[in-house]
Image: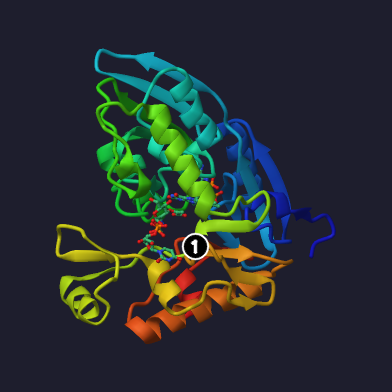
């Protein structure tokens, strides 16, 4: 640990007790640029965080962590839609509530997802049948070395399942500073998932959907303020239709979701559950008892406990189903991001 280390315990929702050499809270793009230039001059690594709800720090960070705190929301009314411009450091759930209180529907299925608005495009957050890409209008990105802010329109973001250009081509050197959402005036509730199918499309309101989503989430997902976690630890795996057919012959009750492109998505939580791993514990880390896809910091877990548990879960599922899970969570080492599959393989 460094002589003037800053704790990151409050800045990662796993509540891991790790540190960074430098910690900067940035309320503007200029402050981010300043911090980046200083870290470049000192040849230290640099990373931007929102709420740390999708990261696993493997060890102390040897450089600068910038917390994106760029605030501000403006609403523009157009004939067919509202356009909401939000600073990257606006809390996502509060933004969802803000729109509903203004009488603007469209974000209700994405209620209670932790994190900042500026992080939402990165893995194209999704829940209950809606993804960020469905309401994304644009993403404003600061390119650090040219100091320019560029606006990417939705079609340029290469959104996929838990994926976007911000995890690939624009991963380094690019910081999201704002997002623009397009919320159509003509509202069509999305009621295809879970308990939402019980709601009546003819009478349902956006608040009804919001409340049902919050209730489902609270029944399964631990509140990070009480129990450290990062939501789904792994992505739901995509496999070929042929492999899915073989697995279904053996496990006819296996949840599976054909994607229309020859691929089939499986439920990683179900696969882990079938290995009877709910509640399985290594050190202070455990598989959540209400949702097997969530790994929790049950009791003073170390990063090594979480890594060992993730490795064990992946190998058990791989051996039983020949399906090899990939983490959704981003692994951060002392110098920057590490390849998560390599770390737990
Ligand atoms: P962070 O964890 O701070 O950062 C994530 C990654 O993005 C890091 O690599 C970071 O370096 C990078 N980054 C952060 N901000 C910027 C920026 N401004 N510019 C460039 N890079 C940046 N996700 C879903 O999709 N659906 C869910 O239903 C869902 N449920 C969850 C439930 C719980 C209880 C928890 C804890 C997590 C859940 N998640 C879910 C995961 C998480 O909420 C999302 O991934 C969220 O978008 C992460 O936001 P964050 O601000 O915490 O990002
Ligand atoms: N299941 C089990 N046992 C478990 C967990 C799940 O059998 O322990 C089964 C469920 O019964 C259901 C299926 O698996 O048939 C899917 O479970 P669930 O509806 O809980 O959703 P999920 O696939 O586990 C995904 C997202 C969540 C998102 C929900 C709701 C991923 C990786 N996860 O979870 O996102 O909130 O759907 O849309 O795609 C996140 O990304 O962090 C996250 C929480």
Residue 233, compared with residue 76, is above or below; it is below
Mark 1 closeness class: few <14, some 14–19, many ≥20 residues within 10 Å: many
Residue at 45 percent of width and 66 percent of height: 327
Q: Describe the element under mark 1 as helix, strand or loop.
A: loop
Quarter of the rendering containing residue 286: bottom right
Of residues 85 and 148, which is closer to you in this image?
85
- Asked if residue 192 lies left or right of residue 100, the reply is left
Of residues 201 and 120, which is closer to you in this image?
201
Residue at 64 percent of width and 43 percent of height: 35
- Asked if residue 18 lies left or right of residue 281, the reply is right
| Residue 169 location (% of width, % of height) | 36, 53
Q: Quarter of the image containing the N terminus? A: bottom right
Quarter of the rendering containing residue 140: top left
Residue reaching furthest to the bottom: 319
| Residue 163 location (% of width, % of height) | 35, 54
| Residue 147 location (% of width, % of height) | 49, 36
| Residue 129 location (% of width, % of height) | 31, 45
Quarter of the rendering containing residue 184: top left
- Asked if residue 211 lies left or right of residue 26, the reply is left
Q: Is residue 332 visible?
A: no
The reply to whether the residue tagged 1 has its Cβ within 8 angstroms of ligand 2 is yes
Q: Which residue, given by chain and number where applicable, does mark 1 sit on?
A: 291
């Amino acid at each position: 640990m460094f002589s003037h280390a800053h704790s990151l315990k409050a800045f990662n929702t796993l509540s891991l007790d790790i540190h960074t050499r430098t910690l900067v809270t940035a309320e503007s793009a200029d402050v981010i640029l300043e911090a980046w230039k200083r870290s470049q001059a000192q040849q230290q690594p640099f990373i931007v965080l929102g709420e740390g709800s999708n990261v696993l720090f493997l060890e102390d960070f040897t450089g600068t962590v910038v917390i994106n705190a760029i605030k501000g929301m403006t609403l523009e009314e157009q004939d067919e839609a509202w356009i909401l411009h939000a600073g990257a450091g606006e809390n996502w759930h509060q933004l969802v509530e803000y729109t509903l209180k203004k009488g603007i529907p469209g974000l209700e299925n994405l209620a209670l997802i932790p994190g900042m608005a500026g992080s939402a495009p990165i893995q194209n957050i999704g829940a209950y049948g809606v993804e960020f890409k469905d309401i994304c209008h644009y993403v404003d990105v600061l390119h650090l070395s040219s100091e320019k802010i560029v606006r990417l329109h939705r079609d340029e973001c290469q959104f996929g399942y838990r994926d976007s250009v911000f995890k690939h081509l624009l991963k380094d050197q690019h910081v999201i500073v704002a997002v623009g959402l397009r919320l159509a005036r003509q509202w069509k509730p999305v009621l295809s998932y879970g308990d939402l199918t019980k709601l009546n499309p003819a009478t349902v309101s956006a608040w009804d959907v919001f409340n049902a989503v919050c209730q489902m989430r609270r029944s399964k997902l631990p509140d990070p303020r009480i129990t450290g976690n990062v939501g789904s630890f792994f992505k739901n795996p995509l496999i070929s239709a042929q492999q899915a057919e073989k697995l279904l012959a053996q496990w006819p009750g296996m949840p599976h979701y054909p994607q229309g492109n020859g691929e089939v998505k499986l439920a990683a939580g179900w696969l882990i559950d079938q290995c009877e791993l709910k509640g399985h514990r290594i050190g202070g880390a455990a598989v959540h008892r209400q949702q097997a896809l969530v790994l929790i910091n049950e009791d003073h877990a170390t990063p090594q406990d979480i890594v060992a548990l993730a490795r064990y879960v992946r190998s058990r599922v791989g051996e039983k189903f020949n399906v090899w899970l990939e983490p959704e969570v981003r692994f951060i080492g002392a110098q920057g991001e590490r390849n998560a599959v390599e770390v737990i393989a």
